[in-house]
Amino acid sequence: MLDLGCGSGAPVVRDLVAAGHHVTGVDISEVQIQQAQKLVPQADFIMADATSVDFPGGSFDAVVSLYALIHIPQDEQLPLLERIATWLRPGGWFLCSTGQHEWTGMDENWLDSGVAMWWSHADADTDRAWITRAGLTVEQEEFAPEGGRRACAVLGTTSAVTEQASGIRQPAGGRANPQRVRPRPGPRTGPIPNVTGGGHT
């Protein structure tokens, strides 16, 4: 399994490893990767930009990306989704958080922490269209509010699932709806590499 934008490895990588999965985490922050290596030494971690990291086709049974896409420029999100779809094995799942309403801007006091946070996310309809265009099929969509903030999350396989999750600060009236997605059936290009042993799952 792959956690794209894994942060410190908690709770996603930690919980997936505890459930018996082999997990690879990717994050752009060296500090976060160092923390993750200490918190979850059983997992593999790579310091890289989510928009430039790459893996062979069919490397993972599942890809998780929570609260990461929403901090990537919108014009880079569809190309990333298309690459993620190729990383999944047939029947694999993709879970990510997205925005409910389109917004790009800076929250100067994110979660009242005194820390500025930059956001860039499309609306739910656009995210759903991008996921489908990437070759994934949305299986489930849900809405999870948190403290007046709205977010989305997407779950999918070689089709895609979208789920809107909570925790994203958005403009007033923003709303998120999670969806579940599976990849659409269709021919894959090229053989699926053997990733047993030290491979990614």
Image: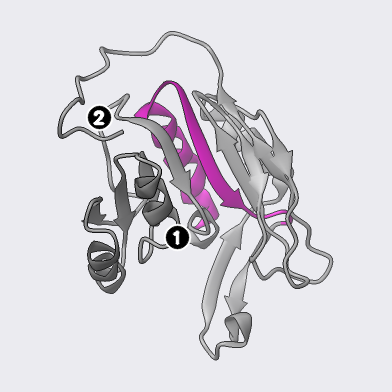
Foreground label between 2 and 1:
1
Quadrant of residue 187 in the image?
Answer: top left
Q: Up-down: is 116 above or below 79?
A: below
Residue at the outermost bottom position? 114
Residue at the outermost right position? 173
Q: Identify the magenta region.
A: 73-101
Quadrant of the snapshot with the N terminus: top left
> With 124 as the anchor, is 4 left or right in this view?
left
> With 5 as the anchor, is 42 left or right in this view?
left
- Residue 91 on the magenta segment: yes
Q: Which residue is mark 2?
A: 56
Colouring style: one colour
Element class at badge 2: loop
Front position in the image: 20 or 99 = 20
Give the image location of residue 119, x and y in percent.
Answer: 57, 67
Q: Which residue is mark 1?
A: 11
Front position in the image: 23 or 178 = 23
Q: Amino acid at mark 2?
A: Pro
- Residue 27 on the magenta segment: no
At x 58% / y 51%, what residue is drawn? 97
Give the image location of residue 179, x and y in percent.
Answer: 68, 39
Q: Up-down: is 91 above or below 117?
A: above
